[in-house]
Amino acid sequence: MRRLLLLLALMAVACSPIPRATEVKIDLALKTLVPADTVLMAGARVDALLKTPLYQTYFADKPVPAIDDLARRTGVDPRKDLWQLLFISNGRDGVLLGRGKFADQEALKPAIGEQRSLYKGYGLIGDGRTATLFINPSTAALGEMPALNSLVDQIPKSMGPPASLAALLKEIPPSAQLWAAYTGGAVKLPFDANSNLANVNRLLTGSQSAILFADLSAGMQATAQVTFSSIQGAQQARDSAQGLLGFARLGIRSGQKDLAAALDQIKVTQDQQRVKIQIDLSQELADRLLKSFR
């Protein structure tokens, strides 16, 4: 009887559905480095992104400054040996973490104006203002010296994203190759103040939380979701987004049918204090659109 009960128990376990991942995939070696004061995380699953049709066709030969700079500083081949990137920020300082098959730091030759140094046993190569920190042979960090020193100081007590960020990460699907999560408060992203991307800093400062994710494995599916402190703030953001779409449609010239079709696939909705923008382009439409821009 005992053997029969044990056999039935084993069969029940074997037949039970395997739990599926319900949040974005983050390399554990990077995840455990996230300090407790982090308010923003943004990641790229580089190894998965490089395999997508859109990247292979339209972006494989284009420079990506952040990736290229990390590759130069660490000796990694970003097309083969870089697996994940993770940007973390406490609202004031940010650090770019990388996971990959990095070159032996002792074999790396510092660039002109750079030198080697140590901080609490960790090797750095930099110019005194910015540096590359080598945490282990497969994990490195790029940033300004104070931010890197703070990261090292917190390594012994870092236990992964704080609870507020961890909750947002569960809303990002594991299929996303590009993603970001933000828990509110003042933040300064490394964008040129004179560029359009500078508006992202202003938008985030006025919000309570936000997530962004994109999947390029079959076309282009992307979602941006921002929660504001009031319904009025959400209404203003929704109206602004819809107004921009309206202006974009007015600017469409004859013969730009693909652009018109793409704009039709952008949906802006509001639910109380939350505004969501969704983009859903098929592989065919994304191909035609990017070809026209190219």
Image: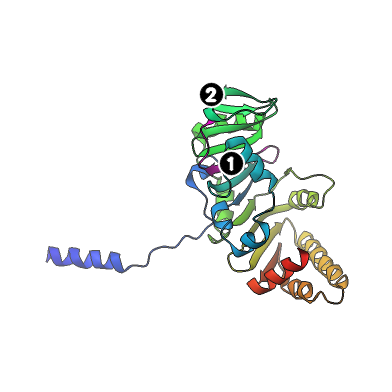
Q: In the image, 239: left or right of 35?
A: right
Q: Is residue 172 above or below residue 155?
A: below
Q: Which residue is mark 1?
A: 97
User: Which region shows up in magenta?
Assistant: 90-105
Q: Which residue is mark 2?
A: 120
Q: Earlier in the sequence, mark 1 or mark 2?
A: 1
Q: Which quadrant of the rendered structure holds the C terminus?
A: bottom right
Image-quadrant location for residue 126: top right
Q: In the image, 72: left or right of 239?
A: left
Dot 1 lies on which element? strand
Q: Position of residue 87 (x, y in %)?
A: 63, 44
Dot 2 lies on which element? loop
Residue located 49% across and 42% down the image: 29
Q: Residue furthest left?
A: 1
Whether residue 282 is visible here, answered yes or no, is: no
Q: Position of residue 143 (x, y in %)?
A: 66, 35
Q: Please, what is the three-letter code of the amino acid marked with disc 2?
A: Lys
